[in-house]
Image (spheres, grey):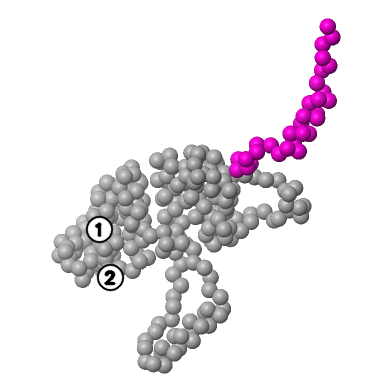
């Protein structure tokens, strides 16, 4: 697509793009190239301020059905479609398009042990000795796609007042290695933010689960552990709503004793 940058003016560029889109329409073997040209046309419309035209042009592509397009490029296309729908206040279409993205592809992958890496290396070497063409594995870092996806999901959940979904999306953002290691990003999605969304969630088993498990399993501790015993550590405010008793018996006895000490004597008749 580099030849599009060498066009003399914008009008000529638009003419070439429309010609390419017309010629390649319905041809499966050039569907990826047509999608990329369509993305360029959508970006031009967006720069001109015509968000509706940009969304209509880009959303007509069903990139999830393209077999020759790699998974990362598909996800980037769908994220761009959802972003345009949100900017165009088309919340229904944005929700429909966002469900085309697999969260399993964006989920955090467990790190392989040195033994597993060594075993995979030996397996590749054995297959190469047999004459098979085995390429070296390439790590596909999808952290940027994951953060963009959940940022859009939080926006959609806040628009629809779905506080439970918003809390779950914030938990997924916290369960990201790049967020854990960056204090600025970690502060923007802090524990107080999660507490707020958990409290706003309507009552139910899902809310009780979130209150009992305030952080993802792999989430690192934000503050260093306290040297005092566990039973004396201050519990978070959200965990106080998960016990059958509102106050422990020892606290109620202490409060009753202090009340007896300060109450006034009975009236004499």
- Range drawn in magenta: 240-269
Choose top left, top right, bottom left or bottom right for residue 43: bottom left
Local SS, label 2: loop
Distance CA(mark 2)–CA(mark 1): 14 Å
The disc at residue 61 is 1
Of the 4 image quadrants, the one containing the C terminus is top right
**Which residue is rendered at x = 54% and y = 45% of the image?**
208
Question: Nearer the N terminus, badge 2 or badge 1?
Answer: 1
On the picture, is 237 further left or further right than 68? right
Residue 262, image quadrant = top right
Residue 75 position within the rendered picture, expressed as x and y whole percent measured from the top left = 36, 61
Q: Residue furthest left?
A: 23
Depicted 206 relative to depicted 122: above or below: above
Residue 191 locus on image (x, y percent): 59, 48
Residue contact between numbered discs 2 and 1, judged by CB atoms under 8 Å: no
Side of 88 where 176 appears, left or right:
right
- 138 or 183: nearer the viewer: 138
Q: Is residue 109 magenta?
A: no
Callout 1: SS = loop
Q: Which residue is mark 2?
A: 68
């Amino acid at each position: 697509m580099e030849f599009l940058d060498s066009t003399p003016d914008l009008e000529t560029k638009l003419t070439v793009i429309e010609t390419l889109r017309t010629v390649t329409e319905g041809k499966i073997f050039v569907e990826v190239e047509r999608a990329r040209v369509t993305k360029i046309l959508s970006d031009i419309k967006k720069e001109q301020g015509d968000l509706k035209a940009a969304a209509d042009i880009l959303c007509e592509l069903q990139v999830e059905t393209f077999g020759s397009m790699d998974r990362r490029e598909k996800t980037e296309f769908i994220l761009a479609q959802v972003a345009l729908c949100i900017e165009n206040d088309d919340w229904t279409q944005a929700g429909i398009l966002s469900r085309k993205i697999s969260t399993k592809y964006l989920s955090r992958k467990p790190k392989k042990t040195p033994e597993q890496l060594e075993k995979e290396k030996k397996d590749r070497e054995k297959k190469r000795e047999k004459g098979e063409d085995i390429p070296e594995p390439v790590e596909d870092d999808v952290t940027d796609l994951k953060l963009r996806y959940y940022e859009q999901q939080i926006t959609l959940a806040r628009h629809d007042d779905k506080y439970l979904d918003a809390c779950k999306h914030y938990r997924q953002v916290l369960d990201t290695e790049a967020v854990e290691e960056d204090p600025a990003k970690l502060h923007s999605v802090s524990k107080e933010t999660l507490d707020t969304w958990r409290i706003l969630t309507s009552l139910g088993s899902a809310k009780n689960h979130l209150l009992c498990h305030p952080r993802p399993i792999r989430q690192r501790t934000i503050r260093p552990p306290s040297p005092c015993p566990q039973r004396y550590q201050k519990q978070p405010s959200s965990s106080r709503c998960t016990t059958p008793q509102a106050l422990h018996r020892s606290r109620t006895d202490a409060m009753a004793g202090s009340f007896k000490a300060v109450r006034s004597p009975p009236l004499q008749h």
